[in-house]
Amino acid sequence: MAEKVIQKFFDDAVAQGLAPGFQFVVFDKDSLIASGASGVVDVGSATAFRKDHLLWLASCSKISISIMVLRILEKGLCPNGMTLADLDNHEKLVQVLPEFRRGSDSPVSKIIIGYEKELDPDGKKVPILRDYEGKVTLRMLLTHTSGLAYYWNHPFMVEMYQPTDGTPPLKQFPFATGLIEDFSCPLVQEPGTGYIYGASADWVGQFIIRCTGINLRQAFKKYIFEPLEIPSSELDLYIPPEHAARRAAMHAQSPTGSGFISIPFDIYMSEGDPAEGYAYFASGPLFGTIEAYTKVLQAALRHDPRILAETTWQLAVRDALTEQGIKLKPRKTIAPLSLSTLPFPPGQIFKSTVPGEEFASQTVSGRPPGSYGWCGLPSVWYAIDEATGKGYMLGTQLLVPFSDSPLMDLKDEFEKLVWSTIKTPGGGDLGGLDKKLGAT
């Protein structure tokens, strides 16, 4: 019954024109309460969205990257002997990632404080850089407190990737080029002094491959997919030709403002080792089905011992912001993504933990305190709550401004259904949800 009712919820959302189509899962620790798909996978072909279509999961991949790092440290796989006790050890980190050593030639050893008035001989902006006083640690990279930002949420980074005055950019988007050089950017604030969402996962990816001696695709398979029995046909960093037809199309809103259009959108992929100077886009490397990725989320929900010891799971969900004495400020996105402040209602606060943003108060959608989750650029979300033993994942492939999109309201309404009406793991009690949605 739960699956039937939730199916209607998303069928109605498609009929209302909120997205071309969806995949969705509601789960408990060991089973799926509801799973399905709705709408079309490509407005150009009108092909029905199926549960086996492959979505770009984008930043929802980050929980896997973080878990993998903890597994590597727990197992003592770093050649320099780095362990979980060294999360705050700068010297141990720079033995693996020397780019972060102060005084190195890497951009990540500097802070950007602006741009020179004069352009360089190529007509490009010249960043003004200085050494930072603090020291970057692995914990900071895992919890977005290192000082790194993204190309869409800080004005200095916007000018680096998409200059507002029409001058040539200094860097290209790394998810498209695959170039390590393109995510090697200066910090925008002193390390450990504030929370800012940034490209730290790309450097965490470098940490993984340098510690293990294998590429990121191989590391995912060895440390995440194989222990959880997830086949590469359902979740991977590379889509082989035989599965290309299963890839969901990326969409954007039509220029007319009515309906959607499918758009070309490629992520750097490599079947084997990336070429010298290239890397998988570790900030969002995974393609897969929502059902397949749910196995990773269930592992986190039940603290699966095949992945991490219980003490390490407990370490992962500790409040990193309070421990570092950091107070959170409202977050903003910058054009072209959006010009809006991201939702941050009064009284709703969150902590930064290794798995994601953990809410310390009930959310506007009714998610309980202690629940945590994350989102991905093409309108993909997940959330997990250990207290109630439930979670969900919801995905489409639609590039719209997060804070301006009706999809945010849809996500909140879905969370209300998950946490206020589905009472019993396995869907035994709908709490009147069937009556609310008119299910028969």
Image: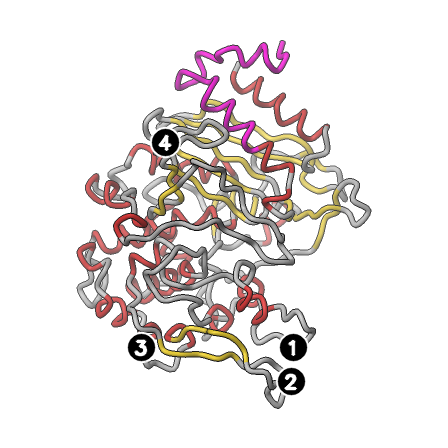
Going from the N terminus, do you reach mark 2 or mark 4 first? 2
Which x, y percent locates residue 205? 39, 61
With respect to residue 343, does 166 lie above or below? below
Left or right? Give the position of 22 relative to 289: right
Looking at the picture, tell me which residue is in the foreground, 381 or 74.
381
Q: Residue at 46%, 20% (x, y): give it.
A: 420
| Residue where numbered disc 4 is placed | 369
Q: Position of residue 170 (x, y in %)?
A: 57, 76
- Few, some or many residues within 10 Å of mark 3 (<14, 14–19, 20+): some
* Relative height, residue 216 to residue 331 (above, below): below
Q: Quadrant of residue 196?
A: bottom left
Q: Secondary structure at mark 4?
A: loop
Specify the amino acid type for callout 1. Answer: Pro
Taking the view exactly as shown, the residue that stands out farthest to the bottom is 121
Number of the label disc, if any, that sits on residue 246: none
Mark 3: which secondary structure? loop
- Which of pointers 1 and 4 indicates the residue nearer the eye? 4
Q: Are marks 2 and 4 in contact (CB under 8 Å)?
A: no
Task: Estimate the spatial distance between the alpha carbons at disc 3 and disc 1, rounded to whole Å.
Answer: 29 Å
Measure the alpha-carbon separation of dots 2 and 4: 51 Å
Q: Is residue 16 above or below residue 82?
A: above
Q: Amino acid at mark 2?
A: Gly
Q: Earlier in the sequence, mark 4 or mark 3?
A: 3
Residue 250 vs residue 89: left or right? right
Mark 2 nearby-residue class (10 Å; few <14, some 14–19, many ≥20)? few
SS category of the residue bearing label 1: loop
Of the numbered discs 2 and 3, the one sitting upstream in the chain is 3
Residue 121 drawn in magenta? no
| Residue at the disc numbered 2 | 123
Q: The disc labelled 4 sits on which kind of residue?
A: Pro
The residue that label 1 is drawn on is 168
- Say which amino acid is labelled 3: Arg
